[in-house]
Amino acid sequence: MSDPSEPLAVALFSEIFTADQLARNRLSKVLPKGMELSHFSVLNHLARLKGEKTPAQLAQSFHLTRGAMTNTLAKLEWAGHIHVRPDWDDARRKLVSISPAGMRAREAAIAAISPVISDVVDEIGIDRVRQSLPVLRELREKLAESSDPSDP
């Protein structure tokens, strides 16, 4: 006998995946030239932290493999958007921070994507968006509890 909640779960995740794909596509088109959504995400994270993180910590925060994060960080470093330095306490580790150029790139990205995001929120309605946030947060937290980026 099938679980009666299965169609609901499939419909929920189908909507989430489709919304994610559409949002990424729309935002990628308006980001400043050469910036990818992954770059913006890392810059935004580092700007909010106002500190340094190791590449491993960043990979864990984004639920990515270290290799995937290393690739993104290399592109950001090449563009001058981040600083990568040795950890003076542990020479095997590196520490990453956002550079002034990275802060400017982040601000340019926010200026580019804000109208797109605001338009969608306005069309849906601020109250309805606000009501959906607790459910989406709880869903994210539940998924994060069992997430391991190294799993195939």
Image (cartoon, grey):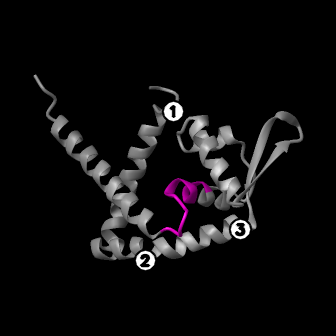
- For residue 101, the mark is 3
Q: Secondary structure at mark 3?
A: helix
Disc 2 from disc 3: Cα separation: 22 Å
Q: Which residue is mark 1?
A: 149
- For residue 115, the mark is 2
- For residue 39, the mark is none
Q: Residues within 10 Å of mark 3 (few under 14, many from 20)?
A: few
Q: Secondary structure at mark 1?
A: loop
* Corner quadrant of residue 120: bottom left
Magenta residues (range)? 31-42
Residue ID at (20%, 45%): 11
Choose between 25 and 137: the one closer to the eye. 25
Disc 2 from disc 1: Cα separation: 32 Å
Disc 3 from disc 1: Cα separation: 30 Å
**Disc 2 marks which amino acid?**
Pro
**Disc 1 marks which amino acid?**
Pro
* Corner quadrant of residue 132: bottom left
Choose between 100 and 114: the one closer to the eye. 100
Residue 26 among those drawn in magenta: no
